[in-house]
Image (cartoon, rainbow, N blue to C red):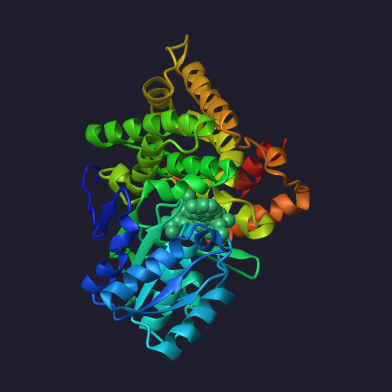
């Protein structure tokens, strides 16, 4: 029923200057006696964050082992490596120090350890639902995925990129020091801001009436992210802007901006996941590369939402017709993406699929979504191919 909802967001947020110093005490408070510190390609080593986190664990008397090397679009092989290491060392807590890729890999390891009799891959193949998960905590270094509060873990294997969603993996805590994100390359900052916008837009462009308060939160979040993404483009070390974006990243994907709607859209995300699987693109950039094409394909089917978005979020003055207003709103969002250096088509993303590739992308997306996806408009395999074609023009 429209207006009904369940919001479950159990993650303790510790936000602000030097927040990482509290990590050890948090792991201990949530029952961890031996933590697997999981991290990525080395940014946390170079910044000194890893050493500070280890010192905090030592101070709290929490044993730890570590495993780095998680890549963007994290791989199942690394998950298996983490599982073996954790088993050999009696790990009872997963501590992700990094971004969405690290957090999602940690969640996968946590699932695997809690039900060791099964292959964790089954969860991502959707042949089995998880029944347990070890506790996960996070020290976030990039505002983007929202995985620090979300119910989702997205893992890549073979030529697939698949998600597993369950409240079981929602992190126990999220340590968020906005200053830690100041070392991000400009492209990653912009891609992160775009992903944050998309997590709210995927919940905004839906059919049926919505709660006014939820809409107001969503619109305020979108305007705030656009405003501070522009600040960071020109002044990457601006702490206030880092803080606004970081907090928005968590609220955008913890469920808040979807409260009371009757099912999210997430078509752009599912289209992007196939691009990620085939071309290993940066998630946020893959999203902006397809969003405009998706929006032009579906807007007539969800016109009041697109008109509201144009006026309340993008500041478009009402045009002669609702369709014109909606199209101006879409164009304004694409202008914004370009203004922060994000692609608005596949060419700008740096991928050049031929017709066979497009059919494969659409087929894989249809398989992954059980044949259809979307709320603004239900998309089937032929629609998915059409949107990829539009984005490829
Ligand atoms: O690996 P390191 O060296 O740390 O470098 C990373 C990586 O190259 C770098 N980085 C992160 N923090 C940094 C930094 N570099 C300098 N200074 C810092 N402070 O940034 C690069 C990207 O990191 P990644 O973790 O891949 O980024 P993001 O947080 O955007 O995560 C992307 C992954 O999350 C998934 C995406 O599909 C993708 O696989 N998603 C997960 C979701 C979820 N679990 O709820 C929802 C999302 O929609 C998304 O699908
Ligand atoms: Zn996303």
Which residue sits at x=38%, y=66%? 53
Q: Position of residue 12 (x, y in %)?
A: 24, 58
Residue ID at (37%, 83%): 91
- The residue lying furthest to the top in this view is 320
Residue 105 seen by the camera: yes
Q: Position of residue 76 (x, y in %)?
A: 56, 73
Across and down, in percent, residue 218 comes to 33, 36
Quadrant in the picture for the C terminus: top right
In-front residue for pair 312/25: 25
Does 17 appear above or below 104? above
Q: Position of 100 compared to 290: left or right?
A: left
Q: Is residue 276 above or below residue 230?
A: below
Q: Residue 205, can we see it?
A: no
Residue 123, above or below 374: below
139 lies left or right of 298: left
User: Within the image, what quadrant is residue 337 found in?
Assistant: top right
Image position, residue 356 (x, y; %)? 77, 53
Q: Count up the numbered dots.
A: 0
């Amino acid at each position: 029923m429209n207006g009904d909802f369940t919001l479950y967001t159990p993650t303790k947020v510790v936000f602000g200057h030097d927040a990482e110093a509290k990590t050890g005490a948090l792991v201990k408070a949530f029952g961890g006696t031996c933590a697997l510190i999981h991290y990525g390609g080395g940014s946390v080593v170079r910044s000194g964050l890893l050493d500070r986190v280890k010192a905090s664990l030592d101070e709290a008397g929490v044993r730890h082992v570590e495993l780095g090397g998680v890549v963007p679009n994290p791989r199942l092989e690394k998950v298996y490596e983490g599982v073996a290491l954790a088993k050999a060392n009696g790990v009872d807590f997963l501590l992700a120090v990094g971004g969405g890729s690290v957090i999602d890999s940690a969640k996968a390891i946590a699932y695997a350890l809690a039900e060791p009799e099964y292959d964790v891959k089954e969860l991502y193949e959707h042949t089995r639902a998880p029944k347990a998960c070890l506790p996960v905590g996070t020290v976030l270094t990039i505002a983007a995925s929202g995985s620090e509060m979300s119910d989702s873990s997205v893992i890549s294997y073979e030529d697939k990129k698949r998600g597993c969603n369950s409240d079981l993996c929602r992190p126990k805590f999220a340590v968020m020091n906005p200053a830690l994100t100041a070392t991000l390359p400009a492209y990653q900052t912009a891609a992160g801001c775009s992903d944050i916008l998309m997590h709210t837009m995927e919940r905004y462009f839906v059919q049926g009436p919505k709660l006014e308060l939820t809409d107001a939160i969503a619109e305020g979040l979108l305007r705030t992210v656009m405003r501070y993404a522009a600040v960071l483009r020109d002044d990457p070390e601006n702490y206030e802007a880092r803080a606004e974006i970081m907090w928005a990243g968590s609220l955008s994907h913890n469920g808040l901006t979807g409260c009371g709607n009757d099912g999210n859209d997430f078509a752009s995300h599912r289209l992007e996941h196939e691009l990620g699987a085939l071309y290993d693109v940066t998630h946020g950039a893959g999203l902006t590369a397809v969003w405009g094409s998706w929006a032009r394909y579906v807007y007539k089917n969800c016109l009041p939402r697109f008109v509201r978005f144009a006026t309340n979020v993008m500041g478009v003055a009402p045009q002669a017709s609702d369709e014109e207003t909606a199209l101006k709103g879409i164009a304004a969002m694409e202008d914004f993406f370009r203004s922060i250096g994000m692609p608005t088509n596949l060419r700008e993303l740096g991928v050049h699929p031929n017709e066979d590739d497009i059919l494969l992308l659409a087929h894989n997306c249809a398989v992954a979504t059980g044949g259809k996806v979307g709320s603004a408009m239900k998309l089937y395999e032929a629609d998915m191919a059409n949107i990829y074609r539009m984005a490829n023009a």
